Structures are given as C-alpha cells and as structure tokens.
Image (cartoon, grey):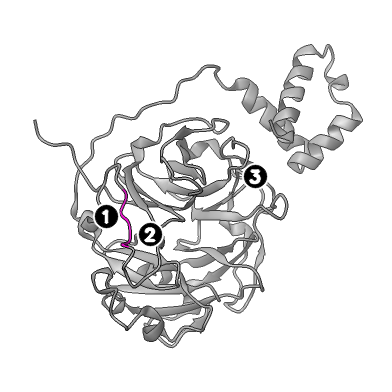
Amino acid sequence: MDDRDALVKELIRLARDAEEPQVLLADSLRDQATAAFDSLEEALAAALMESAAPRGRRPQKSEVERRLTEAFEHPLYVATADGKYFSLDGPVLETGPSPYTVDDDDEVDPITAVHYVGDSDDVVLFTTTGRYFGLDRRMIPTWDRRDQPRTIRDILFLEAQESVCAILPRRKVAVGRVIHVTREGKGKASDASEFGSGLDRSGLDAFLVRDGDLPIAVLGGPTENTLFCASRQGQGIHFDADDMRSMGRKAVGVNVMKLQGDDDAVVSAFLGRHVRQVAVITELGFGKRLDFSEFRTQGRGGQGMQVIRLNPGDGVAGVCPCNPAEDLGVTTDQGRVFRIPATDLNLMGRPARGDQVIELRAQERILHLSALPCGSAPEAS
C-alpha cells in the first residue's frame, strides 16, 4: 500500500469515527494530505470516491459487436529501436493471442511502437528533437521492403540522434491547435496556422525540447478540447486545454503534470473530446478499461487522480482512448507486438489493479499501447 492509499484509508476511518466535523483532521494529517495530493480538497475527494465505491464489484465483461470495416485495410506505422520508421499493411498484424515478431535475421531492430492514423494520404511526422516534416505517406518506406538500404533517415535527412516519434494526418494539423507533451511533464499548444498549409520535407521546428527530455505525444484537434496525461506512477490528470495558452512553435511550453520523483515520467497523452472509455496497461502486463467520466477536469499542473493501483516494481506503460468494439496494439521491449480485442481488458474502476492480459517472457516489459481498428469478426455460425 502506498502513502496515498494509506492516507485515504485513514481519512475514511476518521470520518466514520469522528463525532464532530471540526475535529476530523489533526494538523499533522492536514499536512500529509496537502503533501500527497497537492491540496486538502483533493485528498478529501479521493477519500469520498473510495468510500462511495461499491465493495466486491466484479470486473465487467463487455458484450459488443465486432465488425471488420475498411479501416482494417488502412496502413499502420511502426517505429523500431534503431530509429527507423515504416508503413505496414494493416492485415499483417493479426488479432489474436500470438504476437507478431521480427525475425532474428531481419535488417532492423525490434519494433518499439505501432501508430494508426486512418487512411490519410498526406501526413506530418514529428521527431524527438521537435522538428516536423510533411509528406505523402507513400514516401514512407514499407515494412515488406525493410531490407532496402533507403530508410526514413535518407528521405527526411534526420540528424544522428533524431527519430520519428509521432505521426498525424495532415487534416489534424490544418485547423484548431497542435499540442505536444513531453516525458518530463512539459506541454505546449500552437495554433495550426503556425504550421502552414503545404507539405515540407525540409524539416521545421515544431517545438523546443530540453536536453534529456523527449516528446511522448503530439496531438491535433479543435481548439475547444480537454487534455489527459498519464504518468508511469499510475496517476492521470484531465484538464481544459484552454489552460494552455497558444505559443509560437519555438517555445518549450508549460508544466502540464506534477511528477513523483526521478523514476516517474509522463507516458501517454491524448485529447479528451468525445472520449468515452480508456485502456491502460502496465509494464508487467496488467490491464483494464475505464469509463473516461471517472476523470473529472482539474487544474493544469497537479498530480491528478489514480488511474490504476500498481504492484511493486510495476509502472504504467500506456493509456489510450479505446472503442470496446475495436482492437489495441501492445508492444514489448523484446519486439513482440500483440493485437488484441479491447474487450480482453475488463471494465473496472480507477482503484483496481487490472488483470494479467499479456503473458510476458522473463525480463520482458511492455513499452507501448495504441488504439487500432477491429482486426477480426466472429465467424458466421
């Protein structure tokens, strides 16, 4: 049990035993609550939600209709450990318990992430140094020709330690705002007009990244929106995107989330408009789905609310919006990629630990989680 859990249980116990509200909290407990939750109000809200949660609630299995659509044929995009980036035919990654793996004799390192952006022909690639490149997606090298000498580095003239970290369809960068979030909890919003209307393979600055930091998400969407950020230590913060004023492209940004120590980091971020459910998976393979309504909007820059209760030595690998009728892509540090139905993750509350949904090898950990279109449908009887 971590300090926050223990504090919540103590607040609940005191509330049950106290005869008068004014003697509920000693000064020492007030100080602990403020230190752990940023404010006494946040601590009391956590205790209220915990005490109101139904006891013994069983995880909910979802009965949904899975249907294959043309989205299954759309390309996926995969990043590899050696900094390469490819387009992959969607049907190559099959839904099921068996992972897709890179052969030992392949000319590339293991896959580290899988991205899906629909069927857009024009895309914008963002890199770890904060640059962006616009190009026709057909210029991205294909996975079935990964042994060819020409790579994404040759097409975009990337710097030595620079690699592609995010991809957006061009339409997402044409209107509204573009927001980036980094591992160290920095974020910045820029008006889409800052990025121009054409495609440019020369590489322009999208945002500044401090030494030692890395962008973990680049998002594009309407100006009126919310932003959700999740940390490795199992916290998530949901706030109004208007809390981030628009800045020029050449800016570092503002604090979006308070982290808990040197081993904490922001691992995922997404825009909250129209999101109904989210999926979360940990580095050791525990996962669940949650109703997004469990995360009320708060002020930017706090620790947020609990996303999942972690086992010792575990951390959150990823959180993403999900459709129960579609799939999730799970990538491990040994290059194995699982495509599983979203309903393999049971619907649970925020304090739940989740179920073991991916059986890992010795010393294997999960790196990345992404939402994918449905890859299989029930066979007709």
Which range of residues does the magenta coloring cover?
A: 99-103
Residue type, mark 2 in image: Val
In-image side of 86 versus 58 (left or right): left
Give coordinates of residue 328: x percent, y percent: 36, 47
Q: Is residue 287 above or below residue 241?
A: above
Which residue position is annotated with label 1?
Answer: 93
Residues under numbered marks 2 and 1 in contact, where contact means CB atoms less than 8 Å apart: yes
| Residue at 53% across, 72% down | 128
Q: Which mark is residue 114?
A: 2
| Residue at 40% across, 26% down | 60
Residue type, mark 3 in image: Gly
Q: Quadrant of the C terminus?
A: top left
Q: Is residue 218 visible?
A: yes
Q: Which is nearer the N-term, disc 2 or disc 3?
A: 2
Q: Name the front one of labels 2 and 3.
A: 2
Q: CA distance from mark 2 to mark 3?
A: 27 Å
Residues under numbered marks 2 and 3 in contact, where contact means CB atoms less than 8 Å apart: no
Which residue position is annotated with label 3?
Answer: 304
Residue in the foreground of this view, choosing between 135 and 341: 341
